[in-house]
């Protein structure tokens, strides 16, 4: 699989359930990230910097964390501010 403009090996397989894979792929596409999600294949993303890594983590967390975990995260952010 070749990504446009890819010169270094920055591609990573994302270990996520098949049910969440398509939603993660769609959101990463909306964020303008290079990724691939083919039938019966794992999600593959290209990570070029720390910001992209954090975006991937955030998208996955939004879909996989429990409601209570998400509430706690928001409450912690409010406390830090």
Image (tube, helix red, strand yellow):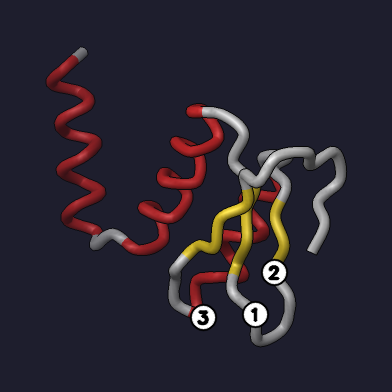
Q: Is residue 80 left or right of residue 50?
A: left
The mark nearer the N terminus, 2 or 3, is: 3
| Distance CA(mark 2)–CA(mark 1) | 7 Å
Residue 72 lies in quadrant = top left
| Distance CA(mark 2)–CA(mark 3) | 10 Å
**Is the C-beta separation of discs 1 and 3 under 8 Å?**
no
Task: Say few, some or many: other residues with alpha carbon within 10 Å of mark 2 (under 14 / 14 to 19 / 20 or more).
Answer: some
Q: Quadrant of the C terminus?
A: top left
Horizontal and vertical percent for residue 56? 50, 46
Q: Residue furthest top?
A: 81
User: Which residue occupies the foreground of this view, 58 or 50?
Assistant: 50
Q: Establish if 7 lies above or below 24.
A: above
Q: Quadrant of the N terminus?
A: bottom right
- Look at the numbered disc 3 and give the secondary structure of its residue: helix
Horizontal and vertical percent for residue 10? 62, 44
**Is the C-beta separation of discs 2 and 1 under 8 Å?**
yes
- Look at the numbered disc 2 and give the secondary structure of its residue: loop
User: Which residue occupies the foreground of this view, 10 or 44?
Assistant: 10
Q: Residue at x 58, y 65 (%)?
A: 23
Q: Look at mark 1 in the image and give the residue it sits on.
A: 41
| Distance CA(mark 1)–CA(mark 3) | 9 Å
Q: Look at mark 2 in the image and give the residue it sits on.
A: 37
Q: Residue at x 24, y 62 (%)?
A: 66
Task: Say few, some or many: other residues with alpha carbon within 10 Å of mark 1 (under 14 / 14 to 19 / 20 or more).
Answer: few
Q: Residue furthest bottom?
A: 40
Q: Look at mark 3 in the image and give the residue it sits on.
A: 18
Circle on res. 4? none
Q: Residue at x 43, y 55 (%)?
A: 60
Discs 1/3, front: 1
């Amino acid at each position: 699989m070749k990504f446009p403009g890819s010169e270094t090996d920055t591609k990573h397989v994302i270990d996520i359930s098949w049910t969440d894979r398509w939603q993660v792929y769609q959101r990463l596409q909306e964020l303008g990230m290079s990724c691939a999600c083919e039938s019966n294949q794992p999600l593959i993303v290209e990570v070029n910097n720390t910001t992209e890594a954090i975006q991937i983590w955030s998208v996955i967390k939004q879909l996989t964390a429990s409601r209570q975990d998400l509430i706690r995260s928001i409450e912690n952010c409010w406390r830090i501010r």
